[in-house]
Amino acid sequence: MASALAWLCLVDDPVPNTLRTTLDTLVTNELAWLLNTAPWIAHIDDEKGLARTLDQLLNNAEPGVTDPDLWG
């Protein structure tokens, strides 16, 4: 999961179908709940941080950051 997120953050290439399939397999409600406690994801959205992060990375969704001070 960490590698997939890193790739999505660092590369502007189209997302390969294999990566989308991998994310569909790996992203579970439990994983989302665990990752939502990470400060950088929690600042995106308190409850749906992973989903909103992936939506931004995969679908170019608007960021909608709720807290402008990500590291504060």
Image (spheres, rainbow, N blue to C red):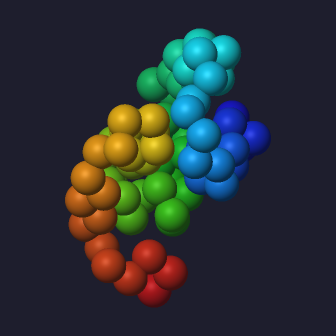
- Residue 24 in view of the camera: yes
At x 25%, y 66%, the residue is: 66
| Residue 51 image-quadrant placement | top left
Please, is residue 18 above or below residue 6 in the view?
above
Most extreme residue toward the bottom is 72
- Would residue 60 appear left or right of 62 to someone viewing this image? right
Q: Position of residue 67 (x, y in %)?
A: 30, 73
Q: Nearer the viewer, residue 67 or 56?
A: 56
At x 39%, y 64%, the residue is: 43
Quarter placement of the N terminus: top right
Quarter placement of the C terminus: bottom left
Please, is residue 45 above or below residue 70 in the view?
above
Q: Position of residue 58 (x, y in %)?
A: 45, 35
| Residue 5 image-quadrant placement | top right
Most extreme residue toward the right is 3
Q: Nearer the viewer, residue 27 or 5?
A: 5
Q: Position of residue 38 (x, y in %)?
A: 55, 57
At x 42%, y 58%, the residue is: 42
At x 64%, y 49%, the residue is: 11
| Residue 26 image-quadrant placement | top right
Q: Nearer the viewer, residue 32 or 16?
A: 16
Q: Position of residue 33 (x, y in %)?
A: 47, 38
- Residue 5 in view of the camera: no
- Would residue 47 appear left or right of 8 to someone viewing this image? left
Please, is residue 20 above or below residue 5 in the view?
above
Q: Nearer the viewer, residue 16 or 21?
A: 16
